[in-house]
Image (tube, rainbow, N blue to C red):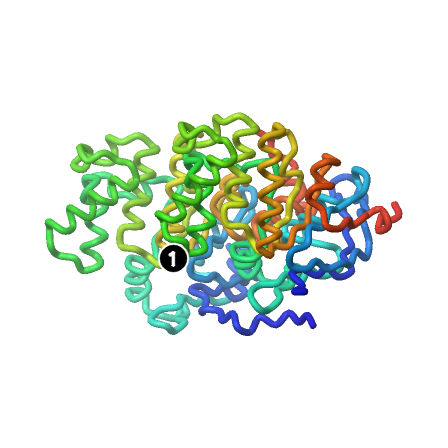
């Protein structure tokens, strides 16, 4: 199998300099690798560091120790030591992060938010429009909203715009932080199908899901972080 | 076997290199020992509170103030040239044609007695354009892009609101299609609604034109929306740098932690 991501000895502690320099250890020496077509679900109680790990894999948080090798074409980029421009390039082509929250950009229309990553990858504008429309329809977002900026949308509507953006042209590695939280059953089913399709098309998936039923339908493997809990 | 070789990804050359840039005002430190490289299409943010040295650094980078020591290299005709080792007229010509500066106060960047169309068209004449019809058409195109309506083209900037003046300044800076743009607090002093319009405009222009930009701001939300990379300055020194989302979401330096935790969530 093709390895898509390999985490090596990841250790994280937060140091809060303005609060008596208190050190908060999260986890230590986490190592694993994920192959193409796998869906690894991060497991463990609240506070065990699931979201922190996911953010480290994306390069959003910096680990105290360790490396994250991400497949980028036929080579690997170490997200921890790569230059910012390399990390941005990996994010554009190889690794995506999906949360339940949409970062709203003032005045940008919903459909343009969904098209944006495709355009950045060189997809033609009319094809991007067609695929974005199909995806928004599939996620049951009313067509009258497509040409409006989502700042006035409900939380669930914003969330579906975000999911459409992430799954319309899924990255080879997808990091999912509770993408189905607070969706109704019908839309949750659509997202579960989208994840399965991305996986079947060769994406590697690493995710956090609190909903047990969703977790069982999505996962091919579990990674329990409890064993890596750092001593406080 | 995993190796982190990324040799097949060839880097283009940086458009701007700062090498140990230091500026002192007598005994006082303006900025100290600042080094970085900036690539085409990249947007670098410099954040810090008043007096942190961010505007001093910007003035050195933009060729306005000579640094006390260190050098600034700008890539011109495929060769790096040292900005303060070339004759003054050559540097001024580069400043007019190859890069642009958006000032915090639009009155510093505009000619207040010249019409809006003239403010934009003048930059095209600097570049060598001579055909009046073409210059006017291009000026009009740019005024539309910054959302200034056609019927204001002959008005003078002092008849404009602050937000319109700032948009006009941006058109004036971007019309010659510079390769590098410096911005000092581009949304400072504007209403929040006007800021949002301007930010989106800047974001789209920078992306569509592929220009490199250095943006000085004390507003972390502006930095998050517009920049790829961030340098945090305090007392003239760069105390932390990295990807913008990394620096803002997982700040390591005490001062950056203070800055990010001091923001009131809207």
Q: Is residue B191 visible?
A: no
Residue B138 or A31: which is nearer the viewer?
Answer: A31
Which of the pair A3/B102 is nearer the observer?
A3
Q: Quadrant of the C terminus of chain B?
A: top right
Q: Is residue A123 above or below residue B80?
A: above
Name the one closer to the observer, A198 or B124: A198
Determine crowd level at label 1: few under 14, some 14-19, many 20+ residues with C-alpha closer than 10 A.
many
Q: Is residue A187 left or right of residue B149?
A: right
Image coords of residue B163 (percent x, y): 34, 33
Number of numbered discs visible in the structure rendering: 1
Residue in the picture at 18% in, 44% down? B118
Residue drawn at x 65%, y 33% is A181
Quadrant of residue A78 within the rendered picture: bottom right
Picture quarter with the N terminus of chain B:
bottom right
Q: Is residue A210 above or below residue A68?
A: above
x, y percentage for residue A177?
66, 42
Q: Is residue B42 visible?
A: yes
Residue B262, x across and y down, in percent: 63, 35
Q: Is residue B115 left or right of residue B95?
A: left
Residue A107 in the image: x percent, y percent? 41, 34
- Give the residue displayed 51% in from the left and 58% down from the top: B23
Q: Which residue is nearer to you in this view: A15 or B255?
A: A15
Circle 1 SS class: strand
User: Where is residue A129, by image quadrant?
Assistant: top left
Q: Residue at x 21, y 40 (%)?
A: B116
Residue that numbered label 1 is attached to: B180
Chain under numbered label 1: B
- Residue A75 vs A227, above or below: the answer is below
């Amino acid at each position: 199998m093709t390895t898509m991501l390999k985490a090596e000895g990841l250790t994280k502690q937060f140091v809060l300099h303005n609060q008596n320099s208190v050190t908060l250890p999260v986890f230590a020496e986490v190592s694993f690798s994920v192959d193409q077509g796998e869906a690894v679900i991060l497991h463990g109680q609240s506070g065990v560091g699931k979201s922190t790990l996911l953010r480290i894999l994306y390069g959003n948080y910096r680990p105290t120790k360790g490396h994250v090798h991400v497949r980028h074409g036929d080579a690997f980029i170490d997200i921890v030591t790569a230059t910012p421009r390399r990390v941005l390039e990996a994010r554009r082509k190889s690794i995506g992060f999906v949360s339940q929250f949409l970062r709203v950009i003032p005045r940008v229309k919903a459909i343009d938010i969904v098209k944006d990553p495709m355009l950045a990858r060189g997809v033609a504008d009319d094809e991007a429009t067609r695929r974005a429309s199909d995806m928004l329809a599939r996620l049951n977002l009313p067509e009258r909203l497509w040409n409006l900026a989502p700042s006035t949308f409900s939380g669930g509507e914003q969330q579906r715009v975000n999911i459409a953006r992430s799954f319309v042209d899924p990255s080879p590695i997808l990091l999912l932080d509770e993408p189905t939280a607070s969706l109704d059953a019908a839309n949750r089913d659509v997202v579960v199908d989208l994840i399965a399709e991305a996986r079947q098309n060769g994406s590697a998936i690493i995710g956090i899901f609190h909903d047990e039923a969703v977790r069982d339908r999505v996962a091919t493997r579990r990674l329990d972080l409890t064993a890596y809990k750092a001593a406080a | 076997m995993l190796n982190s070789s990324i040799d097949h990804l060839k880097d283009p050359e940086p458009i701007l290199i700062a090498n140990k840039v230091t500026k002192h005002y007598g005994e006082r430190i303006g900025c100290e020992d600042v080094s970085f490289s900036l690539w085409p299409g990249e947007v670098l943010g410099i954040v810090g509170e008043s007096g942190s040295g961010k505007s001093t650094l910007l003035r050195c980078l933009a060729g306005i103030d000579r640094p006390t020591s260190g050098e600034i290299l700008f890539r011109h005709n495929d060769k790096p040239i040292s900005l303060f080792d070339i004759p003054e007229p050559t540097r001024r010509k580069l400043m007019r044609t190859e890069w642009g500066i958006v000032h915090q106060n639009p009155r510093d960047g505009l000619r207040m007695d010249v019409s809006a169309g003239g403010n934009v068209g003048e930059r095209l004449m600097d570049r060598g354009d001579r055909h009046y019809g073409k210059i006017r058409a291009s000026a009009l195109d740019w005024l539309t892009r910054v959302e200034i309506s056609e019927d204001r083209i002959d008005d003078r900037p002092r008849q404009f609101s602050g937000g319109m003046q700032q948009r006009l300044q941006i058109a004036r800076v971007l019309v010659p299609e510079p390769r590098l743009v410096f911005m000092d607090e581009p949304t400072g002093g504007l209403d929040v609604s006007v800021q949002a319009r301007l930010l989106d405009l800047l974001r789209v222009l920078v992306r569509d034109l592929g220009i490199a930009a250095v943006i000085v701001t004390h507003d972390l939300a502006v930095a998050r929306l517009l920049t790829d990379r961030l340098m945090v300055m305090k007392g003239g020194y760069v105390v932390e740098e990295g990807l913008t989302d990394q620096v803002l979401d997982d700040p390591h330096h005490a001062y950056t932690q203070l800055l990010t935790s001091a923001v009131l969530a809207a």
